[in-house]
């Protein structure tokens, strides 16, 4: 059990970390403002204060929240589909050499082919409305599959032998052995795939231009040379990405702690 002094030291260390991070953020914001003033060309670069003002005006509109919701919903749907499909395929590949060999070139191609190529190909097959769903799935699937499969393959052989000795099979073996062994790999895969899916999904929207999405607003800002809008929507993308990653990390951490603390 941690002593009060240890807890105080831990809290002090976290506080110092956040202070340092805040100082770094303020430093780069100041550098950004100075660069904008030095260039003095609004079409090329605007300062953080102007971007913040534009973002505040966007946040006050219903279209802003509708666009964020549509993009988040579609990309989130593709991401969740990738998580479930990747986990299921990894479980299948761990049990079947044929399935593993058949899936290897497909997963390799998904990781190697550029996002833009996938976007153009997918646009030939599906409506632009569902483009970000497919792209998010394609980007996240190989990450989840590879990490979960590696976690299954790295399961302690001693635990499996013990299961054989005590005739622990089926769901009990999965629950008692595989879940605990694979959870760290699954957690890393979800965290990594989430950020990649979000960025790739937004990039797909910029190309496909589905209505009421963040990507559409980014494209419009580029076409009309509206630099404040471009930066404001970019800040929105970053903020949503950070919030999503923090939420997923927190949820996954809680799940791991509860699973490990189970009787």
Image (spheres, grey):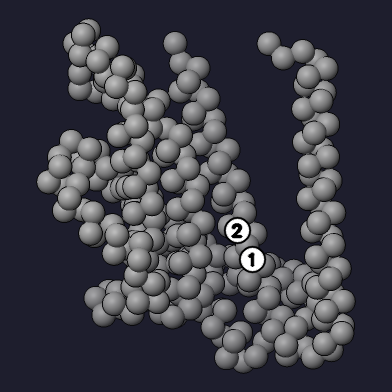
- Give the percent coordinates (x, y) of residue 138: 34, 61
In the rendered image, the quadrant that contains the N terminus is: top right
Asked whether residue 212 appears in the rendered view, the answer is no
Kindly identify the residue that appears in the image at 60 percent across and 65 percent down.
237
Q: Residue furthest left?
A: 98
Question: Between marks 1 and 2, how big is the CA–CA gap?
Answer: 6 Å
- Give the percent coordinates (x, y) of residue 247: 57, 44
- Give the percent coordinates (x, y) of residue 17: 78, 42
- Give the percent coordinates (x, y) of residue 172: 26, 18
Q: Residue 109 appears in which quarter of the rendering?
A: bottom left
Contact flag, marks 1 and 2 (Cβ < 8 Å): yes
Kindly identify the residue that appears in the image at 83 percent across and 79 percent down.
35
Q: Residue 185 appears in which quarter of the rendering?
A: top left
In the rendered image, the quadrant that contains the C terminus is: top left
170 relative to 228, above or below: above
Other-residue count near label 2 (Cα within 10 Å), few / some / many at <14 / 14–19 / ≥20: some
Residue 240 numbered mark, or none: 2
Q: Residue 105 appears in which quarter of the rendering?
A: bottom left
Depth order, front residue of 166/225? 166
Depth order, front residue of 243/170? 170
Residue 236 numbered mark, or none: 1
Kindly identify the residue that appears in the image at 50 percent across and 47 percent down.
191
């Amino acid at each position: 059990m941690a002593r009060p002094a240890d807890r105080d030291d831990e809290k002090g260390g976290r506080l110092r970390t956040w202070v340092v991070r805040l100082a770094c953020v303020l430093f780069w914001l100041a550098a950004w403002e100075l660069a904008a003033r030095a260039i003095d060309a609004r079409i090329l670069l605007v300062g953080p204060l102007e971007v913040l003002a534009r973002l505040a005006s966007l946040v006050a509109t219903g279209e802003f929240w509708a666009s964020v919701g549509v993009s988040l919903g579609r990309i989130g749907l593709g991401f969740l589909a990738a998580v479930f499909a990747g986990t299921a395929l990894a479980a299948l590949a761990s049990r079947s050499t044929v399935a593993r060999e058949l899936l290897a070139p497909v997963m390799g191609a998904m990781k190697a082919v550029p996002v833009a190529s996938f976007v153009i190909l997918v646009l030939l097959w599906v409506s632009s409305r569902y483009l970000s769903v497919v792209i998010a799935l394609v980007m996240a699937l190989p990450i989840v599959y590879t990490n979960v499969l590696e976690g299954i393959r790295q399961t302690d052989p001693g635990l499996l032998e013990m299961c054989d000795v005590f005739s622990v099979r089926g769901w009990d073996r999965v629950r008692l052995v595989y879940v605990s062994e694979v959870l760290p790999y699954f957690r890393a895969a979800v965290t990594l795939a989430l950020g990649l899916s979000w960025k790739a999904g937004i990039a797909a929207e910029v190309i496909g231009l589905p209505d009421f999405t963040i990507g559409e607003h980014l494209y419009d800002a580029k076409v009309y040379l509206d630099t404040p809008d471009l930066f404001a929507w970019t800040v929105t993308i970053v903020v949503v990405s950070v919030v999503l990653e923090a939420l997923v990390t927190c949820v996954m951490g809680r799940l791991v702690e509860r699973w490990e603390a189970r009787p």
